[in-house]
Image: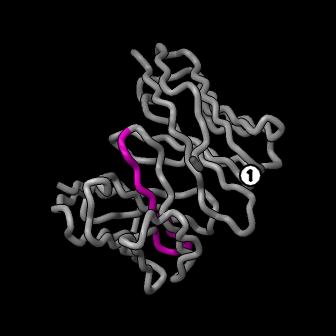
Amino acid sequence: GAGVSQTPSNKVTEKGKYVELRCDPISGHTALYWYRQSLGQGPEFLIYFQGTGAADDSGLPNDRFFAVRPEGSVSTLKIQRTERGDSAVYLCASSLIGGSEQYFGPGTRLTVT
Amino acid sequence: SQQGEEDPQALSIQEGENATMNCSYKTSINNLQWYRQNSGRGLVHLILIRSNEREKHSGRLRVTLDTSKKSSSLLITASRAADTASYFCAVRYNAGNNRKLIWGLGTSLAVNP
């Protein structure tokens, strides 16, 4: 595809529910990143994939957060038992190799009520 | 906090003036990147400067890196109203095989016509 795409663009869910956020990276990009961004803040690193494996998941805030990239392309960020504090814009980015310039998707705005 | 620091937090200038934003970081880096974010286009990569480089140019953008002071600056010359956006620096630190980016809080730039 032409760029990184993310679905859904908006997600409203009730506290305690489970959500999945999807990211389609640029074709051929081996590195994929998940961030979340709150209003007035910079992106906060969550997890980085190199191919199918999570190379660095040190940013995941707790075990309610999990991400997969089973075929080395599309990735899904999964959040269990959502809390109001999880409300943020979740950003996905991809790059040719890890650590180089990143291309961002438009984000998914998650609101937990 | 893992985040770097940027200053100023907000900057307001007239069209045609130059804008300078600064970024400081904590330990030795592999590279430092500048990104722009506005509501219309999301996060967009501007420039990547490596730790062994001191200055890079791209159009009206000039980035400098001073590793002795652990700081970088982004200069936008002859600013335009379309440059109105938030600008973030992101660093790739040198620790091990670390390939994630750590982001600053951003500078909000307003260019008045």
Q: Is residue A10 above or below residue A20?
A: above
Could you say where residue A25 lies in the image, as x and y percent from the top left? 43, 69
User: Which one is in front, A13 or A10?
Assistant: A13
- Which amino acid, mark 1? Ile
Q: Is residue B46 visible?
A: no
> How many numbered badges does the structure rendering display?
1
Could you say where residue B94 lies in the image, as x and y percent from the top left? 75, 58
Residue at left offset 46%, top offset 35%:
B86
Residue at left offset 41%, top offset 55%:
A36
- In the image, residue A27 lies in the stretch drawn in magenta: yes
Q: Please indicate whether residue A84 sits to the left or right of residue B78 in the image.
A: left
Q: Is residue B39 above or below residue A17?
A: above
Residue at left offset 59%, top offset 50%:
B2
- In the image, residue B41 lies in the stretch drawn in magenta: no
Kindly state the secondary structure of the residue where label 1 is placed.
strand
User: Which one is in front, B89 or B56?
Assistant: B89
Q: Which residues are magenta?
A: A26-39
Q: Please indicate whether residue A35 sits to the left or right of residue A85 in the image.
A: right
Quadrant in which the C terminus of chain A appears: bottom left
Location of residue B96 by image quarter: bottom right
Q: What residue does disc 1 label?
A: B29
Could you say where residue B84 lies in the image, as x and y percent from the top left? 43, 28
Residue at left offset 48%, top offset 82%:
A72
Could you say where residue A4 lies in the image, as x and y percent from the top left? 41, 63
Residue count near mark 1 (Cα–Cα under 10 Å), binned few <14, some 14–19, many ≥20: some
Give the colour scheme of this rendering: one colour
Q: Please indicate whether residue B70 sits to the left or right of residue B1 in the image.
A: right
Q: Is residue B65 above or below residue B28?
A: above
| Chain letter of the residue carrying label 1 | B
